[in-house]
Image (cartoon, helix red, strand yellow):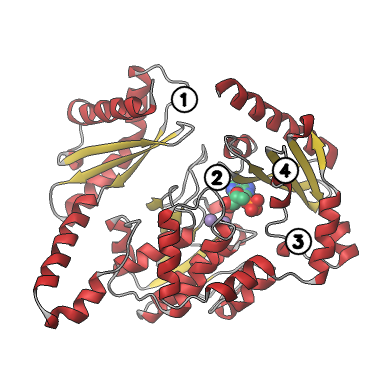
Amino acid sequence: MREGHLEETLRRIIAQALVDRVKDPRIAFVTINEVRLSRDKTSAQIFYTVLGSDEERRKSMQGLRSSAGFLQSIIGDSLRLKTIPRLHFRYDDSLDRSFRLEEILDDLHSGPEGEAERSEEMRFIPYPPPPDLVEVFREHHSFRLTTHVNPDADGIGSLLGLGLALEAAGKTVQMVRHEDGPSAFSVLPGYDRAVLPGELQGEDEVLVLLDCHELERIGPAADGLTGREKVVVIDHHLTGDGDSEGEVQWIEPAAAASASMVHSLVGAMEELSLSGEVASCLYAGLITDTGGFRFSNTDATTLHVGGDLVEHGADAAALAESFLHRRSPATLRLLARVLDSFDYRLGGKVVLARMTRAMCEETGGRMEDTEGFVNFATSAEGVELVALLKEVDEQTWRVSLRANDPYDVQRVAETFGGGGHAKAAGCTLQGPVEEVEERILEALSRELQMETAEG
Ligand code: AMP
Ligand code: MN
Ligand code: MN
């Protein structure tokens, strides 16, 4: 079945089932507008609208989420599919947005006295956040912001950017960093005020996961939670088979970085402002996740968001220097060792590379400062897939996976309990290094064959 056709079929099945089969008064005023399938067809975003008040909107969201499993089983019964997609409901505010445009046009006609208001209204919001998420930030006062373990600049930049914006609006915020981040983090505003998980104080009303959607991925930052916190997810990773956490989830795989989503969230809340400091944190996240606007996640919107951040005070050259270019001599010695480890396999289409603790000790390089090393392997002619194994301890290897078009390493990572994006993903494997390498190589070889067979 063609993808567009399948999406429309799914839309009709779901809309019909809501009328005929799901007996839930909360979804009475729901209209299903559009279904968008992920590339691998394992997850679907269902865009819907609701006639009625904010309260009715909130209830329909709960009703839809609680019927997702039932709807999936109806889809399974109605269509012969290899996998039944997991359903993610997203409030479709394109209608709200067109109303907003009308307001802006009205303002334009209302003359010079509307000037100040108008500049507020002209905020650039390419990824409108779900209304229930905005509501959580409005209604609550204390927030604990976290990101995934082994944080990258997108995780930490999104966290600091949102944290500083909320603080400026009078909210109480605890920003949790992880030990041993990349050295470049120290240039980010607010990083010196972020605390280690052990330094957290008291309870917070809301726990926010940035750039990840599973509590296991925030490691020790989850310690000491009471379970009473409201959990909010802001992430651009595809949801795999693992259950995502959070009562309020905002997952936007089309966004190049979580920082782009935070940029839209700040834009959507009039009480938050995009200060130069906030913009700098977000810009650092955006440039690292796009490799300096070079990876395939770079589209026109990515560049527009970058432009908006620079317009609001992010120093493009200085941040690129800190996050993409400058390395210590020790880090470069470590790079030489990693480059030297490249092992070309499967007719030169796959590179296996290694970074051991011994290499770090011998060169003085830190594993945290090796962002981008793995990309050197994708630049080698003829190479399609790359795995860089980083030694955590003798029996534990963190694997960074990369793919060139049309290959997909997210599905490879997922088979090992990891995740990420189609072109950049990761997972952690246990065992001696030779064994880990063979398992990874076997999975990559299957990915090569699958794509060859499909294409
Ligand atoms: P890295 O190779 O560490 O740069 O990670 C590439 C991408 O995969 C990033 O978006 C990570 O957040 C994601 N990722 C890495 N390791 C894991 C994991 N164990 N589970 C889920 N996602 C991961
Ligand atoms: Mn990340
Ligand atoms: Mn990210």
Query: In the image shown, does 27 or 163 lie closer to the viewer?
Result: 163
The answer for how far apart the CA atoms under marks 2 and 3 are is 22 Å
* The N terminus lies in quadrant: top left
Q: Quadrant of residue 359?
A: bottom right
- Which amino acid, mark 3? Met
Residue found farthest to the right: 362
State the residue position of label 2: 421
Give how far apart the Cα atoms at labels 4 and 3 are: 16 Å
- Foreground of the two, 32 or 393: 32
Question: Considering only order in the chain, which callout, 3 or 4, is on the residue closer to the N terminus?
Answer: 3
Figure label count: 4
Of badges 1 and 2, the one in the foreground is: 2
Q: Is residue 282 visible?
A: yes
Label 4: how many Cα within 10 Å (few below 14, some 14–19, many 20+): many
Q: Which residue is mark 3?
A: 367
Residue 53, given in percent of the width and then of the height, sits at 14, 54
| Furthest residue in direction front, as rendered | 381
Q: Secondary structure at mark 4?
A: strand
Q: CA distance from mark 4 to mark 2?
A: 14 Å
The mark nearer the N terminus, 4 or 1, is 1
Which mark is first along the chain, 3 or 2? 3
Q: Nearer the viewer, mark 4 or mark 3?
A: 4
Q: Is residue 139 left or right of residue 198?
A: left
Q: Which mark is residue 83?
A: 1
Q: Residue 455's mark? A: none
The residue labelled by disc 4 is 387
Give the residue type that dot 2 points to.
Answer: His
Q: Which amino acid is tagged 1?
A: Thr
Gap between marks 1 and 3 measured at Cα: 38 Å
Amino acid type, callout 4? Ala
